[in-house]
Image (tube, rainbow, N blue to C red):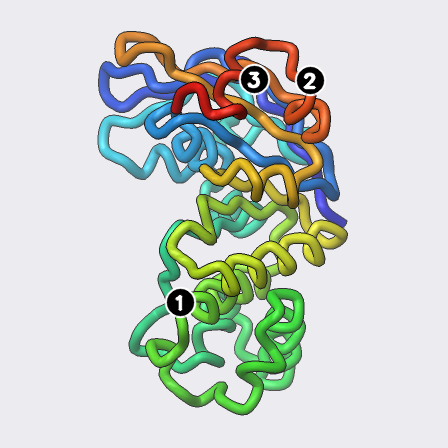
Amino acid sequence: MSIGMRIAGLDAWFGTDQVLGGIDMTIEQGTVTAIIGPSGCGKSTLLRCLNRMHEEVAGARVSGNVLFDGRDLYAPGTDPVDVRRRIGMVFQRPNPFPTMSIGENVVAGLKLRGRYDRRDLKERAEKAMRHAGVWDELKDRLDQPSGRLSGGQQQRLCIARTLAVEPELLLMDEPASALDPISTQQIEDTIAELKSEVTIVIVTHNMQQAARISDQTAFMLRESMDAPARLVEIDATKKMFTNPDDKRTESYITGRFG
């Protein structure tokens, strides 16, 4: 079962530059949350803070609380590797492992965890590929190089690879921005099918996409480079796109800036 998340007073820095300030939001389990806002407003940084990837950048640091399953992910003694297993991430550009076959890509994370039973790996790979909507297309090509796939197939393969380790929350950083309209629709269909299994947070620049696929939408804004990005508001997607509380949200959604 998917698990929700509570973010409280989250600040983030790159060196001395504070890029996030006082982020407070709740992500309900079994939902899709879209994060929108202009370029450079901290959306991807926020996403990377949710599975402790932000701290992998030299000089980066975080303060505040990220509660997942009731536990603070930044509490002393918390293993970042375990956090990233439970909270998977799909990046903007597909990143299959080029030296591995399609099938090897899907089970790569499982093998890193020491799961080598061939039957188990095969079953988990098929389940993950079915959830990612790519099994029927690729089931007869599992021994072929992943580099021969189209961009959309590569992205769904990366989703399958992430799903194979059975994360409880899935972060997606503009997963369809580099794809054609047909592949984008396939990714959106995959997201719609996945949310019954895993909670999803997606960063997107596409307003129509956010309106189509998400249950709630968060709008972020960095009003000057001297100020950190902040969460302007978060609410049910329908309300955000028809009657937001903040005029800045309305201006952004209607294309007046950004």
What separation in Å lies between label 3 and label 1 (alpha carbons)?
Answer: 33 Å
Residue at 50% over, 30% down: 36
**Residue under numbered circle 2:** 243
Total labels: the figure holds 3
Image disc number at residue 151: 1
Q: Quadrant of residue 3?
A: top right
Residue 214's quadrant in the figure?
A: top right
Pick the front one: 255 or 28:
255
Sequence-wise first label, 1 or 2: 1
Viewer-closest of 69 and 19: 19
Residue 235 vs 193, above or below: the answer is above
Residue drawn at x 56%, y 17% is 250
Give x and y (percent) for residue 2.
72, 46
Whether pointer 1 and pointer 2 mark residues with C-beta atoms closer than 8 Å, the reply is: no
Three-letter code, disc 1: Gly
* Comes first in the chain, label 3 or label 2: 2
* Corner quadrant of residue 201: top right
Element under label 2?
loop
- Residue 185 falls left or right of residue 44: right
Q: Which amino acid does label 3 sit on?
A: Glu
Q: How far apart are marks 3 and 2 (CA)?
A: 8 Å
The answer to whether residue 112 is visible is no
Q: In this view, does 166 lie above or below 154?
A: above
Nearer to us in this view, 61 or 235: 235
Circle 2: residue type: Asn
Q: Answer with left or right where residue 77 lies relative to residue 67.
A: left
Q: Name the residue under label 3.
A: 250
Residue 170 seen in this snapshot: yes
Q: In this view, does 15 lie to the left or right of 68?
A: left
Q: Residue at x 49, y 69 (%)?
A: 157
